Amino acid sequence: MPTTRVSTTRTEETVQTMRELLKRLREEWPSASFDRLVVEAEAASEPHDTATLARGALLDAMQTGTVHIVYRGACRVEHRRTGLTLGIVHAPYVAGVLEALNGDCGLVYECKAASAALAFDTDDWNALVERRGLWKEVAQVIAIYLEALSVRTAFLTASTAYEAVCNALQLLDGHPPEIKGDLTAVSFVLERTKLSRSIVSKIVSDLRTGGYIEMDRGRLMMIVRPFPLRY
């Protein structure tokens, strides 16, 4: 069970750094670039379809050869080879933007809610980007994706299972209520680490018992106070 000592300065600084990184990522999100890609996709002369995507639908550009410009909904991004969740993105976003340029990047997008998108064959998408001079917007989208992945890696690279769980809970706490309410804390951690369910469940349970987190039916409601440095 976690120690009940007051968290050390190091722990508080780590938590603050995480919060600042997440805040900066949200503030720097290139909304204008995403919005322009959506507008250009809607007006495109290149062949495309309007797709209604059910919750649980998988968007895999390498399997289908399709780029989806999603303008409503949210999805979970998974690394195909490892099965690890890389993050959750909210519309607007482009599923397949990396694959359209670089081949198989191993990413699969799973819709977490009913979504709507414009679907292009990869060649038609690249033709639109070239014809309308959208490379700057594409570059900004890819750059923010890479930054988000680096933040995620920094949070979940930890020397102990306890640190990995605490960092993952910090990530979960940064999501809006509608996303937090749809995910159990244990599942969220398991999808992002290679830890066993028993270890994750034990650590989460002990944090709840120690009064560090508030839970409701397995879902994280809030982090009440900074986590202890040691387990």
Image (cartoon, rainbow, N blue to C red):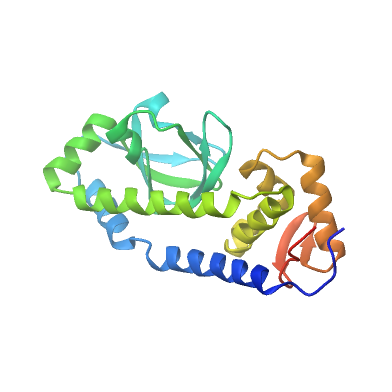
Specify whether 179 is left or right of 107: right
Q: Position of residue 27 (x, y in %)?
A: 41, 68
Can residue 4 be seen from the camera position used here?
yes
> In the image, 156: left or right of 97?
right
Number of numbered discs visible in the structure rendering: 0
Residue 221 appears at what percent x and percent y? 72, 65
Q: Nearer the viewer, residue 54 or 98?
A: 98
Quarter in which the N terminus is drawn: bottom right
Left or right: 106 in relation to 220? left
Image quadrant occupied by the C terminus: bottom right
Q: Is residue 183 visible?
A: no
Residue 95 screen position, x and y as percent:
39, 41
Image position, residue 167 (x, y; %): 64, 57
| Picture layout, residue 195 above or below residue 62 | below
Please give the name of the residue rendered at 29% of the width and 54% of the height, measured from the top-left corner.
140
Q: Identify the residue at image location x=78%, y=62%.
A: 215
The extreme top residue here reads 63
Residue 205 picture quarter:
bottom right
Q: Is residue 221 left or right of residue 146?
A: right
Q: Nearer the viewer, residue 215 or 199?
A: 199
Residue at point 58% right, 38% down? 84
